[in-house]
Image (spheres, grey):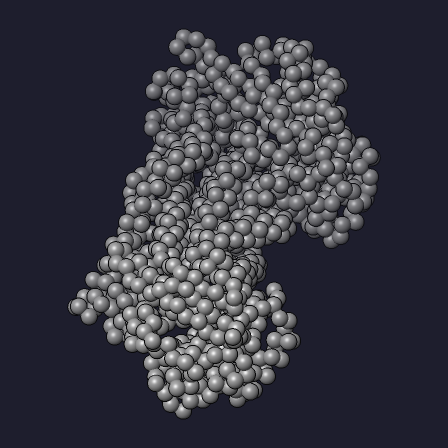
């Protein structure tokens, strides 16, 4: 019997292509968006949850409050972890990761690449993080000096196969390590990638010696990431409670010396990627985007359901007659009900299949733009979502159909298409409400999307205080080479006609900068201040087109020797509290040569950090090349050739300053783009729903339109007649949407230190977009209806 | 005495819209015996069709009672009425009332589906009836592609496919030419002779001449 119903439903859908196509379109757009959003969100949500111990692992960080300064350090002193493990029984195991350096040159024969996240690790690392070994054993893989455990993809990258046991990798062209283990790859979504682990014993002897030093400073000094593994039956509160005693015993001495307070921060492993920016840590994810996307997805689903409800009621209105025939020929209400359910199921199934098909297409296209790994890993969990979706859709449809089928009682009214019973009125009321709701969601999405896009643009264009155009950053990695070589590399680059200026800097914006303590005189009191440091040469400030508020640039001839002075960025003025004019004053023993206008090197999610620039050229860092030309690829080719002449075994790596700055907001840009896409989709679906409702209304009013035309009404007057109602609906939708959006966007904007205000013109634009799109739909539909010959429409009944 | 199939007492149907009350059928007492062929006649708007709809249980009376096959119908639920309809009644309308989205054989099959008959039995029965009505070659066609006469024969096939006791026809020849009209009346007559009761609403004296009895209606009242 079910087959028969499906057969009839299918036939109906095939013979009502407009209705079927619109319903499927609405549903599949919504489904595809939701599958996609789900895969994104579940990618975020499964961060660092891949090993069975994940829920017992915590990373230790310290909030260090100095009188004038507070910082959360992601890295802490080498003694902290081992001694905590010895003294606190709740901790079953601990391990430390010491970064080799931010980027290493790794080579095996001909294969040379830059790698980040190369760590020295304790032998206990595989107890805390039970990685799966493909070759070698965790027990003795990192026991002695010169050993290294790599992931299978690293093995394949350098040796062509995952069986790399006994092979050798050279790091920074200086030290060679033997591969003693190969582990199975972890997914992309881990914060600390453990793809290259070196035995802790391989640290330089003087550093190794320091590891065991029992002095109090050895607990504080940023040195290693510490991870603890809780005992199976222990809680993190036990560690928290026990810590003050531990602090008094081992750490208080140096704390008192610094006049610093120390607060231990225990971050559960899955949260590590999402905690606010710590110093000495990697870029973080932002969960608020997940929530935003999830909300957008939910809105889309609701809009699609309402849309379907509208289309369905429009289609029911046009087929009351055939339903009447069904009833007269013996269909009970349950039969009709089953028929409609079958119809909905077919639509949902086809839409879901189409959505998956769309997504595979999108998946092939997206990786470049949004990170394909993200999509794939999340997608595996997507089948579960499919089920949830179907159930959800079925529930809402059942509810809806129950309401609708109640309307149809006396078959004779169905046959006559009689509207005096209030059935039509009820249905029309439902349609109106649902259209207002759909448009409310759309208005919320439009306003949020406009706000977010504007905020992101604002961030990118905000006063950073330097010109990012056509600046190539060539990575320098020339340890052990004489400084003269760097300088002649710089001069060689400058010879090209394509190059306007070349300057050295130790870092580029967005990188973690080194810091230094200064003792300064603040209102007659001595205060300790921590500022970030950036080494530059005298050509840097002109190259970046930075502006000096006061003072002067470094002198060109001052190449070697101890730094004679510093130039500060604008954020230092309020931070140091030494008055508005700083040039000529001293911090510590160092003279302040000048102050720059703005000069922001950290993400605008936070306030501009104080930075001190000092004059030094080093073996590591960047050679910044300002180009004269717009032929970027030719320029890069030239620079590469020069680089190869000077640095034989060092891979050529470069970036563009504008992209580097954008990179700090990569997440924001991507998410705002995504949200914009979903917004457009929601408008499309809402208009499909409107299309359904207008056709229902027109269907009801065909006679009225006919009579008006007979009596001399113009087409545009008829369009106006229906348009008037529409304006009222949209007005209601906007009125509902504004307070909601105002509240939610306020929450979101708090993520940014520099932010735009909630502007009313955005609300107006949102309302206008909805109104115009809705008017086009209505006008098109009504024009069609009113273009009919009045005789035809009058004969309608 | 022959058994009664239809018996109404003071059957009344009023329509109320806003403030106007219209009485379409007023205090009708009507009996129709099993096997009878009755025609209901009267001018436009006299309530013929309303009376037929009440007899066919597709509309409910405002007051009065209606016994079908000896059972009272007033207190029955929608679904109970539907069950009586699909088991015992077949309908033929002036405008055919075929489902545009279904083809000829599916239209005829409709009542059998709701009766719960299995697929093979349904197909057999539909084919047999359509062959009998010389529509066998049109089974896969859609109503829009048929002539009026053919459409009305499909509607007739659907009305008799469940072998009903009562065939209700509302101006069945109203949209047909005289040749097709006669053909249909012959079919009704044939089924009446085979035992089905027929109640037909008509304007035409010629059509009415097929009936055993003529019920005349004026302003909702029976006048003969």
A767 over A786 or under it: above or below: above
Please, which residue is most extreme toward the bottom here?
Answer: B179
- Provide residue A714's location: percent of width, then percent of height: 19, 66
Outermost residue to the left:
A712
Residue reaching furthest to the top: A524
Q: Residue at x 74, y 45 (%)?
A: A184
Q: Relative to A256, is B60 above or below?
A: below
From the viewer's perspective, is B107 left or right of A121?
Answer: left
Taking depth in this image into account, of B95 and A493 the one nearest to the observer is: B95
Q: x and y percent of residue A668 in the render? A: 47, 42
Q: Nearer the viewer, residue A615 or A47?
A: A47
Q: Is residue A188 above or below residue A332?
A: above
Number of numbered discs visible in the structure rendering: 0
- The structure residue drawn at horizontal position 69% and vertical position 30%, both measured from the top left corner, is A56
- For this view, does B173 lie left or right of residue A510? left
Instruction: Give B160 or A152, whichever is nearer the viewer.
Output: B160
Answer above or below: position of B92 versus A282. Answer: below
- Place of residue A143 in the rendered image (x, y in percent of width and height, measured from the top left): 80, 32
* Residue situated furthest front in the rendering: B1
| Residue A119 found in image quarter | top right
């Amino acid at each position: 019997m079910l087959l028969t119903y499906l057969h009839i439903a299918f036939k109906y859908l095939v013979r009502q292509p407009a209705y079927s196509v619109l319903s499927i379109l609405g549903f599949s757009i919504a489904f595809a968006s939701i599958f996609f959003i789900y895969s994104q969100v579940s990618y975020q949500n499964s961060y660092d949850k891949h090993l069975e111990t994940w829920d017992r692992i915590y990373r230790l960080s310290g909030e260090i409050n100095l009188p004038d300064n507070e910082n959360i350090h992601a890295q802490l002193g080498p003694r902290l972890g081992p001694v905590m493990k010895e003294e606190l029984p709740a901790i079953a195991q601990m391990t430390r990761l010491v970064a080799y350096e931010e980027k290493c040159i790794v080579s095996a024969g001909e294969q040379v690449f830059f790698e980040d996240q190369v760590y020295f690790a304790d032998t206990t690392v595989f107890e805390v993080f039970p990685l799966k070994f493909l070759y070698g054993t965790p027990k003795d893989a990192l026991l002695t000096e010169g050993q290294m455990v790599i992931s299978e993809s690293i093995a394949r990258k350098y040796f062509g196969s995952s069986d790399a046991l006994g092979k050798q990798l050279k790091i920074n062209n200086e030290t060679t390590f033997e591969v003693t283990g190969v582990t199975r790859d972890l997914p992309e979504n881990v914060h600390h990638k453990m793809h290259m682990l070196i035995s802790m014993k391989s640290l330089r002897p003087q550093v190794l010696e320091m590891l065991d030093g029992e002095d109090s400073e050895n607990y504080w000094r940023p040195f290693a990431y510490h991870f603890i593994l809780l005992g199976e039956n222990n809680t993190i509160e036990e560690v928290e409670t026990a810590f003050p005693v531990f602090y008094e015993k081992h750490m208080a001495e140096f704390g008192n010396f610094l006049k610093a307070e120390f607060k231990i921060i225990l971050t559960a492993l899955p949260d590590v990627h999402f905690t606010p920016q710590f110093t000495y840590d990697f870029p973080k994810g932002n969960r608020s985007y997940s929530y935003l996307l999830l909300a957008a997805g939910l809105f889309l689903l609701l809009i699609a359901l309402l849309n379907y409800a509208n289309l369905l009621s429009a289609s029911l209105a046009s087929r009351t007659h055939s339903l009447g025939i069904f009833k007269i020929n013996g269909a009970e209400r349950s039969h009709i009900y089953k028929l409609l359910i079958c119809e909905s199921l077919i639509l949902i199934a086809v839409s879901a299949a189409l959505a998956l098909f769309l997504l595979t297409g999108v998946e092939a296209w997206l990786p470049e733009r949004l990170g394909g790994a993200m999509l794939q890993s999340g997608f595996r969990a997507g089948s579960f979502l499919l089920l949830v979706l179907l159930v959800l859709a079925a529930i809402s449809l059942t509810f809806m159909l129950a309401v609708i089928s109640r309307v149809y009682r006396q078959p004779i009214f169905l046959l006559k298409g009689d509207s005096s019973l209030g059935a039509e009125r009820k249905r029309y009321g439902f349609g109106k409400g649902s259209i207002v709701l759909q448009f409310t969601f759309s208005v919320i999405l439009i306003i949020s999307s406009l706000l977010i896009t504007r905020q992101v643009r604002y961030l990118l264009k905000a006063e950073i205080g330097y010109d990012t155009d056509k600046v190539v950053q060539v990575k320098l990695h020339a340890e052990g080479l004489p400084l003269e070589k760097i300088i002649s590399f710089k001069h060689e680059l400058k010879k090209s006609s394509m190059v306007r200026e070349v300057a050295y800097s130790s870092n580029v914006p967005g990188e973690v900068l080194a810091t230094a303590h200064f003792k300064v005189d603040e209102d007659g009191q001595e205060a300790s201040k921590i500022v970030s440091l950036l080494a530059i040469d005298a050509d840097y400030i002109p190259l970046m087109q930075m502006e000096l508020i006061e003072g002067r640039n470094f002198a060109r001839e001052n190449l070697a020797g101890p730094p004679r002075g510093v130039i500060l960025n604008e954020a230092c003025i309020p931070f140091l509290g030494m008055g508005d004019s700083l040039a000529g004053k001293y911090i510590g023993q160092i003279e302040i040569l000048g102050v720059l206008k703005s000069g922001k090197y950290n993400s605008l999610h936070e306030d501009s950090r104080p930075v001190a620039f000092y004059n030094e050229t080093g073996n590591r860092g960047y050679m910044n090349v300002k180009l004269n030309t717009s032929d970027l690829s030719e320029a890069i080719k030239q620079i590469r050739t020069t680089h190869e002449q000077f640095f034989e075994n060092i891979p050529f790596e470069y970036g563009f300053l504008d992209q580097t700055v954008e990179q700090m907001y990569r997440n924001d840009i991507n998410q705002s783009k995504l949200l914009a896409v979903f917004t457009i989709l929601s408008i499309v679906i809402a208009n499909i729903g409107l299309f359904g409702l207008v056709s229902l209304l027109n269907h009801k009013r065909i006679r009225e339109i006919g009579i008006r035309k007979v009596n001399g009404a113009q087409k545009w007057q008829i369009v106006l007649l229906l348009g008037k109602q529409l304006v009222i609906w949209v007005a209601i939708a906007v009125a509902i949407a504004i307070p909601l959006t105002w509240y939610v966007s306020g929450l979101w904007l708090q993520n940014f230190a520099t932010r735009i205000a909630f502007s009313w013109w955005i609300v107006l634009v949102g309302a206008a977009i909805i109104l115009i799109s809705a008017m086009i739909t209505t006008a098109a539909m009504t024009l069609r209806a009113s273009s009919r010959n009045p005789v035809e429409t009058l004969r309608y009944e | 005495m022959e058994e009664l199939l239809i018996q109404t007492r003071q059957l009344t149907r009023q329509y109320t819209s806003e403030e106007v009350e219209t009485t379409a059928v007023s205090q009708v007492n009507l009996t129709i015996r099993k096997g009878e062929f009755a025609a209901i006649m009267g001018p436009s708007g006299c309530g013929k069709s309303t009376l037929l709809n009440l007899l066919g249980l597709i509309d409910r009376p405002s007051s009065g009672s209606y016994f079908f096959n000896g059972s009272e119908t007033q207190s029955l639920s929608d679904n109970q009425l539907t069950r009586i309809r699909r088991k015992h009644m077949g309908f033929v309308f002036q405008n055919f009332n075929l489902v545009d989205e279904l083809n000829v054989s599916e239209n005829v099959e409709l009542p059998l589906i709701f009766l719960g008959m299995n697929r093979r039995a349904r197909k057999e029965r539909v084919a047999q009836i359509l062959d009998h009505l010389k529509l066998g070659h049109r089974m896969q066609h859609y109503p829009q592609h048929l002539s009026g006469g053919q459409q009305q024969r499909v509607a007739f096939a659907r009305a008799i496919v469940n072998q009903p006791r009562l065939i209700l026809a509302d101006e069945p020849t109203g949209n047909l030419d005289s040749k097709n009209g006669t053909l249909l009346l012959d079919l009704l007559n044939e089924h009446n002779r085979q035992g089905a009761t027929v109640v037909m609403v008509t304007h035409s004296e010629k059509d009415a001449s097929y009936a055993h009895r003529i019920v005349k209606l004026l302003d909702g009242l029976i006048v003969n």
